[in-house]
Amino acid sequence: MIVAIASGKGGTGKTLVTAALAEVWPRPLVAVDLDVEAPNLHLFLHPRLSPPEDAVIEVPVADPARCTACGACVALCQYKAIALFGDFPTVFPDMCHGCGGCLKVCPSGALTPGSRVLGEIMDGRAGAIGFLMGRLRIGEALSPPLIRQVKARLAEGLAKTAGRVDALIDSPPGTSCPAVAAVSGADVVVLVTEPTPFGLHDLKLARHAFAALGVPVGVVINRAGTGERRVYDYCRASGLPILAEIPFERAIAAAYSRGETAIGVSPGLRDIFDVLAKTIRGLVVSVKERTAAHA
Amino acid sequence: MPEITVISGKGGTGKTTVTAAFVHLAGNAVLCDLDVDAPDLPLILRPTREVAVDFRAGHVAVIDPSRCNACGFCMDICRFGAIVAADGEYAVNPLACEGCKACVALCPAGAIDFPVRRCGRRYRSQTRFGPLIHAQLFPGAENSGLLVSELRREARELAVTTGRKIILSDGAPGIGCPVISSLTGTQLAVLVTEPTPSGRHDLERVAELTARFEVPAAVILNKADLGGPAAGAVREACAARGLPIIAEIPYDPGVTAAMVAGQTVTEAGIEAVAAPLRAAWSAILELTAARRAA
Ligand code: SF4
Ligand code: SF4
Ligand code: SF4
Ligand code: SF4
């Protein structure tokens, strides 16, 4: 089972929820940080990490000696990553999306595959929890290709365990391409929000974005007790289940600032996350049963 | 003309709250919400929309079943897993399609169309503090960096035509393409962070980005009193990088109350928060003036 923890914007407590859930998760687990622009999960789970491995994307390298200046590559490239100056092809590797199209349309073999570093991938363990993360290189504009590579690594790992291991994904915030790249393929989406106008606005955006994935979506309300009730009204009116409420407590913020999860703050909080883990698993299982009943 | 952009490396640090207060304090700025994914500045500024236009960028592949001979070649071509096959029919998943055109150019049957994609909406609005340029990207849409660049261009034009002297932007979160577009050509980046290990980690990454693009930066430490040791670590990181901390703001429940009321914290008169923000705004004006004089 793959659980994506997401939110319409950052800072709602996505990482806090992911880290605490990982600590109480009742089955073997790998925790995955796909928020590759701002990966933070390791700061709270404290895994022992392998040395980083470069993740690369294929970009073309041009050989001016073989180029006939036919212009086919320039006409194809949608990202202005190749240009002809006079009769010389020039590649701007930073703008290339790695689609491979130019290499295929070049009639004279003047383009060969090279690479650009997107960032790094690390794996490791935090006690019994498996750990996997990607970190975008500073200055790199494209996070989705790195997200897809970390996901491919996850899929490889999960395939070996024959369904015995679950995955919890800390997703990038927002609803644009990085978030969709991270969340797609999950069995359930947990949206973390807060009871404020910002939280409500961003929750609406996220609900619309992730409803298209066709998997169950639930909400965790963080900093409950601050702000206003409209988030609750919205969830009720739109049939979004509220899976848990995490109260606002200075002790949680203090623990967080020490790099600790909320689990140790009080037995009550531990209970909240225990119940949340069960509720999330229940959402997925009930869908699977319903699907089985239809079949 | 100074362009000041408030960013954070991650969302939720209070970037929009800080920007809104500066909007109030500036009085005569062109305002810009560059977080096109989750634009929150309008929630406080409550704008009246004057102009709305479609944001079209890039293309999307669409297979015409009547021309497709189901050879499956496009599936081998596509590096983004966007071609799906069901019951021997091939189709494109628009959410996964990057619009790279490879399949369009290489389909042996010429069966793939390539229409322009509508990625979002752009708006020009009026607020009680001046004109606001903002946008909403559609879910899963790409080209957010391009949209950010368009908004900034429009803001500059508007500053010239309206005679406003400052462009004040609520930047995009993260360090990827929309943030890079938010920063290029900006005179000062204001980095909002919090006293947590993640706040520090994200601040260091975004500071490295501003250094890479040679954009001067200053830091605001929000909720400074909520984290003891982590606050110290943020201060040390700033000192090591030569980044000035222009304000430390305490946690105050009044901030959320002001947000609920659609007010900036300076309008709402939450002094514990408003006073350091006023000092920060003076510091920003000095930093940008100093830079122009240099
Ligand atoms: S691989 Fe694709 S994106 Fe890169 S240069 Fe070639 S055509 Fe352009
Ligand atoms: S397609 Fe090949 S031969 Fe034609 S311009 Fe590009 S690199 Fe040169
Ligand atoms: S390559 Fe063209 S003809 Fe072949 S399956 Fe794809 S769309 Fe159909
Ligand atoms: S345009 Fe590119 S990304 Fe889209 S379906 Fe075709 S090959 Fe895949």
Image (tube, helix red, strand yellow):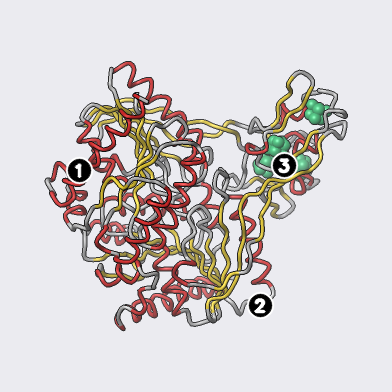
Ligand 1 within 8 Å, label 3 CB: yes
The residue sitting at 79% across, 20% down in the picture is: A87
Task: Please provide percent x and percent y for residue A271.
Answer: 34, 81
Q: Amino acid at mark 1?
A: Thr
Pick the front one: B24 or B202: B202
Q: How many marks?
A: 3
Q: Which mark is residue A144?
A: none
Of badges 2 and 3, the one in the foreground is 3
Please name the residue that numbered disc 2 is placed on.
Answer: A161
Q: Mark 3 — residue?
A: A59
**Badge 3 sits on which subunit?**
A
* Same chain? Circles 2 and 3: yes
Name the element at disc 2: loop
Question: Going by the image, does A228 lie left or right of B293?
Answer: left
Q: Neighbour class for label 3 at 10 Å: few (<14), some, many (≥20)? A: many
Q: The residue marked by circle 2 belongs to what chain?
A: A
Is residue A208 something one can see in this rendering? no
Residue A258, located in which quarter of the rendered image? Answer: bottom left
The residues tagged by marks 2 and 3 sit, at their Cα atoms, a distance apart of 34 Å
Residue B264: mark in rendering:
1
